[in-house]
Image (cartoon, helix red, strand yellow):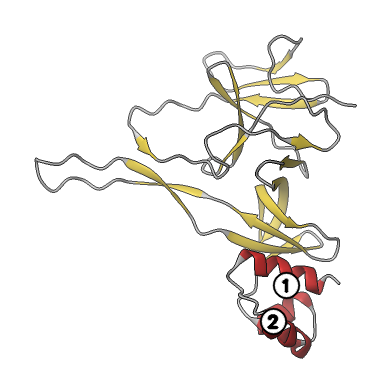
Amino acid sequence: MKKIFLIVFGFTISVVEAQAGSENVSYSTENIFMRANRPTTKEYVIDGNPYTTGEKFNKVMIKGFSKDVQDLRYNAYEDEMEFKNGEELFYVNKGTNIKIQFPDLKKTYESLTYTYDGKSKSGYLVLLVDNPKFSLYKREKMELLKGEKSTNSYTKDANDYYAKETDLYLVAKDKKFSKFPKNVSEASGIFSIDKKELETFVKSNKINFNKEPDMIKLVEFVNK
């Protein structure tokens, strides 16, 4: 079984590329490449955090690799999986179609290159329904917003802060992605299913097109 060592300095690591004076250095272990990223330290304070999995590093499982891997967390602002070695943070290289399971969180992230809205995109998506017919994904994203300036001399300026963007739900078929439908009419076209049949299912199950559990239930229905 392959082992994945995310920059464990006790093992033999060969340098693939390095630039003098650069903070980004690429290393390789057996068959896995890791990017050693040290994010630039901010001189100002940012409120909140960019992690949709929480600040804690969690156990993960990656199919085809040893279970003895570093704990990870997802940085939704940078769209990167982070791990820690000593006091330094590093990013994991994004391998296409690599699935990273967080058992304790009951979440699976997949690193994908895909087409959406006529453009080629790449990054981590949360896998909600995995099916050859129709799959369902969720894109999580954090943005960094500017804090407000104080209007008087008695209060301090508000810090910049992380804010979670509205999750984007995507339906995938044949590697093409489309936004999850808003209603029965859109769903009928996207899923190529009879509108009356779909309408009956939606009404009898009280499907809400804006709620994740109902989205999952709907995709699982059209996959039958």
Element type where label 2 sits in the image:
helix
* Residue 54 image offset from top left, x and y in percent: 54, 40
Residue at the location (75% across, 69% down)?
A: 219
Question: Which image quadrant is residue 135 in?
Answer: bottom right
Residue 185 - label = none
Identify which residue is drawn at 21% across, 41% down: 157
- Residue 221 quadrant: bottom right
- In this view, the residue in front, 86 or 114, is 86
- Pointer 2: what residue? 202
In the rendering, at what x and y percent does residue 126 appear? 67, 51
- Looking at marks 2 and 1 on the same chain, the residue that comes earlier in the sequence is marked by 2
Quadrant for the C terminus in the image: bottom right
The residue located at (83%, 30%) in the rendering is 65
Find disc 1 in the rendering and name its residue: 218
Q: What kind of residue is marked 2?
A: Val
Q: What's under tag 1, amino acid-wise?
A: Leu
Instruction: Label 1, secondary structure: give it.
Output: helix
Rendered residue at 73%/42% (across/down): 101
Determine whether, in the image, residue 99 is placed left or right of residue 42: right
Q: Quadrant of the N terminus?
A: top right
Q: Are marks 2 and 1 in contact (CB under 8 Å)?
A: yes
Mark 1 Cα shell of 10 Å, populated few (<14), some (14-19), many (≥20): some
Number of other residues with Cα within 10 Å of mark 2, as a class: few under 14, some 14 to 19, many 20 or more: some
In this view, 92 is above or below 131 = above
112 relative to 223, above or below: above
Q: Horizontal and vertical percent for residue 81?
A: 63, 36
- Front-most of residues 138 and 101: 101
